[in-house]
Amino acid sequence: MNQKLNLLIIMAVVAASMEFRGTAAVDHIVGDSFGWNNPNGDNVFYDIWSLNQRFHIGDVLVFNFATGAHTVAEVHLGEHQACDSHNASQLITIGPAFVPLLTGGDHFFICSLADHCQKGQSMTIRMEEQ
């Protein structure tokens, strides 16, 4: 009887650990050590960075920048392509900025200051399938 109970407990622990293995949220430091800064005309820097990440619902993007130097604007695809933040779903002006990924699909981010977006401070996030 004790052996059956021990085996049942072990099976329950293993099953529980398998259930939660892939669900832990991850903080992604945008741009790694470069942070959220102007890449001076490198229009693919942040997209290359994001392609090397795996994003899931519940993860958090951490945009490291000095307040007043940059912003984080989440925009739609057309606004992203046009570097237009007028209809941003959110605009964060205080750094560092923490943006939780709460929905699936693609997410688009730009810096709304001066010509920062045109000089490459923009990024597309592609979410992994759940």
Image (tube, helix red, strand yellow):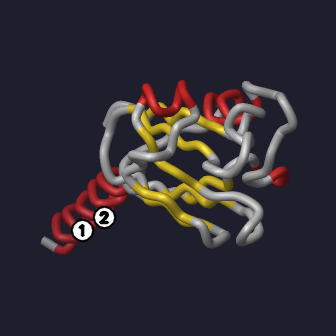
Residue toward you, 48 or 52: 48
Number of residues whose C-alpha sits closer than 10 Å to that of mark 1, classed few (under 14), some (14–19) or many (20 or more): few
- Against 46, residue 98 (above or below) is below
In this picture, residue 6 sits left or right of residue 94: left
Residue at the location (40% across, 35% down)? 76
The image's mark for residue 13 is 2
| Residue 30 location (% of width, % of height) | 67, 50
Label 2 – label 1 distance at C-alpha: 6 Å
Determine the secondary structure under disc 1. Answer: helix
| Residue 18 location (% of width, % of height) | 34, 51
Determine the secondary structure under disc 2. Answer: helix
Work out which quarter of the rendered image holds the C terminus and state it. Answer: top left
Number of residues whose C-alpha sits closer than 10 Å to that of mark 2, classed few (under 14), some (14–19) or many (20 or more): few
> Of circles 2 and 1, which is in front?
2
Q: Are marks 2 and 1 in contact (CB under 8 Å)?
A: yes
Residue at the location (66% across, 70% down)? 95
| Residue 13 location (% of width, % of height) | 31, 64
Residue 7 in sight from this viewpoint: yes
The image's mark for residue 9 is 1
User: Which residue is most to the right?
Assistant: 40
Q: Amino acid at mark 1?
A: Ile
In this picture, residue 79 sits left or right of residue 40: left
Residue at the location (74% across, 46% down)? 31
The image's mark for residue 39 is none
Q: Amino acid at mark 2?
A: Val
- Against 109, residue 52 (above or below) is above
The answer to which image quadrant residue 1 occupies is bottom left
| Residue 89 location (% of width, % of height) | 37, 51
